[in-house]
Image (cartoon, rainbow, N blue to C red):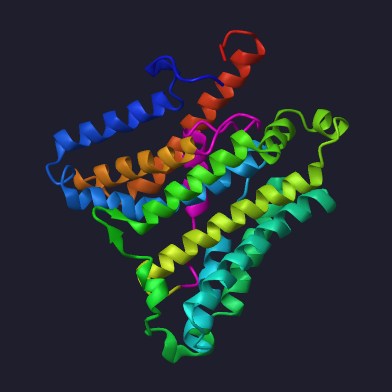
Amino acid sequence: MGPLKSLGDFPNRGLVLVLAAAALGFSSLSPSFRTGGNFENILVGFSHMGILAVGQAFPILLGGVDLSVGSILALSGMIGFDLFLVFQLPGMVVIPVMLAAATAAGAVNGLLIVFARLQPFIATLATMAAYRGLTYAISGRQIYPELATSAIHDRLLLGLDESIGRFPFAFVFLVVVCAAAQFALSLTKFGRDVYTVGGNLEAARLSGVDVSRIFVAAYATSGFCSGLAAVLLVSRMTTSQENLGIGIELSAIAAAIVGGVSLKGGVGDAVGPAIGAFLLGVILIGLNLIGVSTYAQPVLTGLIVLLAVAYDRRKVLLGAHGEFGA
């Protein structure tokens, strides 16, 4: 791809404009929305969602989905809770273990899809329940009730909840993850193979692409992003709970689809899902500040998913009839 010749060539430009319009709209409706404190709240509260959405993009690019990201997040968080508070291990040991466990859990999803021949929806639905059950099984809060109210005081972990000026470290991690993912998708053989497999699996197989490796690596990437989100959330809360991340998979999928990753597979990037996560954040926080009940927020998330899927489906159908330009 050559250099951008105009603003019209900028990727995700439509999504950025929608995000800006939503922010301006809520700023005009609520003075509280346009404060620096609210800006920080959005960055802190939805950077981990952006990381999950970037990870979710990899399975969706293959024409699949990962429903287990919330359970992997909880499992990784509980592993951290146990190692910090039960075994009294330092952050330099615990944090890599949390990330490794989440990555392994994601790789298991890929292995189930490849070797057990399960549909991604079925495989990750099963592991969503299994990983959540495992989280309860290893819960130090259940085994040692006296630890339920204990806080984690590890300096390395708590340092991850600091900020650089107005920008929290969580947002910095999101930028790094987004840049690394976009580099991998755009400039590496792995990225080209992901698009090839997502575009036409059988053609990719016949052209020599190691489809099994791509699936396992993509779901492992999703798992890693869940683990990183768990580290950031545990750092922020100084604890973890068995119900951590329940329902978050819907928001991650919504952010990825809103960010332009097609459910059909083979279309999308890593930047769009991150922007999509902040668009969801702006909408949800904005509605809260203008007095819309928090009970309506899950309903809104579901409606956003429906609209995004309908739009994605319309693009596929129009593209199939030659009516939708690339």
Q: Estimate the x, y position of residue 325 in percent, counting from the top left.
A: 56, 11
Residue 53 horizontal side relative to residue 185, left or right: left
Q: Estimate the x, y position of residue 109 in percent, counting from the top left.
A: 71, 55
Q: Is residue 143 shown above or below 208? A: below
Find the residue positioned furthest to the left: 31
Q: Estimate the x, y position of residue 280 in percent, counting from the top left.
A: 37, 41
Which image quarter holds the N terminus? top right
Which image quarter holds the C terminus? top right
Q: Is residue 44 shown above or below 282? A: below
Q: Is residue 261 magenta?
A: yes
Residue at screen point 70% across, 50% down? 217
Q: Is residue 127 shown above or below 296? A: below
Is residue 287 visible in the rendered image? The answer is: yes
Residue at screen point 40% across, 25% down? 13
Find the residue positioned furthest to the front: 3
Q: 50 or 210: nearer the eye?
A: 210
Tally of numbered tags? 0
* Main secondary-structure element of the magenta-colored stretch: loop
Q: Estimate the x, y position of residue 90 in percent, counting from the top left.
A: 49, 82
Residue 238 horizontal side relative to residue 94, left or right: left
Residue at screen point 56% across, 39% down? 183
Q: 284 or 76: nearer the eye?
A: 76
Residue 47 horizontal side relative to residue 230, left or right: left
Q: Is residue 106 shown above or below 98? A: above
Is residue 245 visible in the rendered image? The answer is: no
Q: Is residue 28 magenta?
A: no
Magenta-colored span: 241-270
